[in-house]
Amino acid sequence: MTPDEVGRYAESLPEVKRKGTEARPAWYVRDRLVARLDDARTVVIRVPLEKRESLLESHPGSFGVPPRMESHHKVEAYLDEADPAAVRAAIDLAWEMQRY
């Protein structure tokens, strides 16, 4: 999956707006973070903590949680290795969580 594909998918969801910079775009719904590109290969996605473990277990090559994010509602998706359907599912979880 490419950063452009992440952006197109995120922006296809209702109320999602692109913010951030050209180098580090981010997608928000109602000013609440859904996803942010950290670099050309890594996107940070907000996910409910109760869903995070199942994402990590189901797609260990797609997602990770570095120590700095352990206490946050976030995962990193590694775009070079990630299953595109899994990344879209994580973005969906973030979108649902941030809508309300």
Image (tube, rainbow, N blue to C red):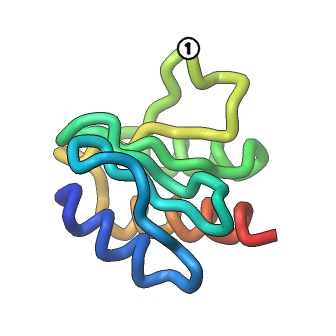
Tell me what residue is drawn at x 73 percent, y 71 percent: 99
Read off the residue under disc 1. 67
Task: Name the kind of residue labelled 1 in the image.
Answer: Pro
Q: Does 39 appear above or below 43?
A: above
Tell me what residue is drawn at x 64 percent, y 45 percent: 52
Tell me what residue is drawn at x 42 percent, y 57 percent: 19
- SS state under label 1: helix
Quarter that holds the N terminus: bottom left
62 sits to left or right of 31: left
Count the labels in the image. Answer: 1
Q: Does 68 appear above or below 53?
A: above
Quarter that holds the C terminus: bottom right
The single residue placed furthest to the right in the displayed view is 100
State whether residue 62 appears in this view: no
Residue 51 horizontal/vertical position (percent):
70, 52
Residue 68 horizontal/vertical position (percent):
56, 16
- Residue 30, quarter of picture: bottom right
The single residue placed furthest to the top in the displayed view is 67
State whether residue 93 appears in this view: yes
11 sits to left or right of 90: left
Q: Does 24 appear above or below 69?
A: below
Residue 32 horizontal/vertical position (percent):
66, 56
Residue 49 horizontal/vertical position (percent):
74, 42
Q: Does 26 appear above or below 69?
A: below
The one of 18 and 42 positioned closer to us in this rendering: 18
Tell me what residue is drawn at x 55 percent, y 57 percent: 34
Q: Residues within 10 Å of mark 1 (few under 14, many from 20)?
A: few
- Residue 23, quarter of picture: top left
